[in-house]
Image (cartoon, rainbow, N blue to C red):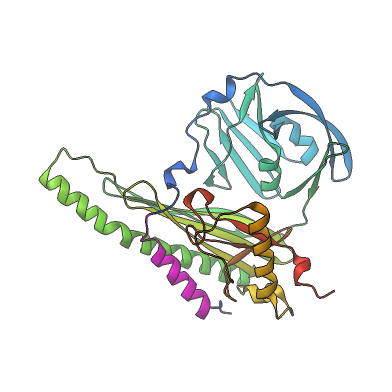
Amino acid sequence: MQMQSSALSDRTRKLLLSLAVVMAFPAASAIPQGIASAAVTKYSTISQPFKINGTSFHIGTINKNGSTYIALRSIDSALGLTTRYDPSSRLVQVTGRNRSIRIGLSTGAISLNGQPIFGPEPILQNGTTYLPLRFLSERFGYEVTYDKGSKLIGLHALKENELSISAETIGADGDDKSLSVYYPVLSGLDNAEVQRTINSFLKQEADRFVTAGSEQMNPVVQANDDLLAENPNAQVRRPTFDGRYTVTYNEKGLLSLYADYSVYLGGAHSNTARVAYTFDLSTGERLSLKDVAGERTDYVTTINEAIKKQIADRGLTLHTPFKTIEPDRDFFLRHNGAVVYFTQYEYTSFADGMPEFVIPYSAFSRT
């Protein structure tokens, strides 16, 4: 059993080379540093109507800047999750559906299945912790809907594949440079051979990017050492390399995720490379965009038309006109469709990040 390698490895090489360019988000900004401001404002709570897996509820929520926040203790019965609070460490832990989120109320740090993730500041009010409903529910595998007429929020548990995904770490920290990469490890899959194949491949990919990141940092380390040798009081910033993954789809025998690798070599920003993976869990094979399109031979044209329309609808400003994707363009899956994305600075400015374009699965159907 082997992974697809030819075109995919070409794209990987391009991503590795792109790490040499300094033009992306700082890796150090990925985790909030504190939530002191969250407790200052007094928010009013409203009784919000919900329909969760077909059952009606009214749950107290807070509206902050257009986002609905829900009390963590309210989700135990409603979503079938378990919330625990350790007052000594001020740590909140929410578990369920093969997931665990830990929230440090003193630090603002949030982790999902052992991996630090970017997250919003919790609201602390009257001894209760609130988090944005969409942030919380989507990370536990719930689809969120909203009916403007009735103001009813719907939550529906997605039917996911039977497996768990946890984080393993490759790390090294010293005075000269810092490296911290998290990569996913699958467990609980019925087919042990497929599980071993995917885990081995993802570990090899993480190792590949760690090697590339280390090679990019070494010249900066040497330059810093030379500068300090001449001037021991000189101020230098050590280079860093950071890797995080995001699972985007775990349904119907398929698993899709992407990994972001960021290297900081000096200057204002880091450079981030994104690489996406979609696996067939029955074989362990990595799927291509053509595989997802099925028998739709004109899938490139279909996707191009969708991207151009979304660019116009969203008013995106491009520094280079968009013409077409490559037939083997990187992508990942979500519940509502396949997602094609622009890499940083490929077509847009730094402020636009990596624009994503969702192509509904129905677009690949001929009926």
One can see residue 299 in this view: yes
18 drawn magenta: yes
- Is residue 346 shown in magenta? no
- Judge whether 103 appears above or below 355 on screen: above
Magenta residues, start to end:
5-22
- The foreground one among 38 and 67 is 67
Please provide percent x and percent y for residue 155. Answer: 80, 44
Q: On the picture, is 360 further left or further right than 201? A: right
* Placement of the C terminus among the 4 image quadrants: bottom right
Q: Quadrant of the N terminus?
A: bottom right
> Left of 125 or right of it: where is 108?
left
- Between residue 137 and residue 199, name the one nearer to us: 137
Task: Look at 40% across and 51% down and name the residue there.
Answer: 270
Q: Is residue 66 left or right of residue 185?
A: right
**Residue at x-position 16% and y-position 45%:** 228
Q: Residue at x 52, y 24 (%)?
A: 36
Q: Quadrant of residue 209?
A: bottom left
Of helix, strand and loop, which mostly describes the magenta segment? helix
**Residue 147 placed where, x, y %?**
84, 42
Residue 192 is at least partly visible in this image: no
Q: Position of residue 78 (x, y in %)?
A: 80, 37
Residue 133 in which image quadrant: top right
Tell which residue pokes out farthest to the left in this image. 230
Observer-nearest of 254 and 16: 16
Location of residue 208 by image quarter: bottom left
Q: Position of residue 13 (x, y in %)?
A: 43, 71
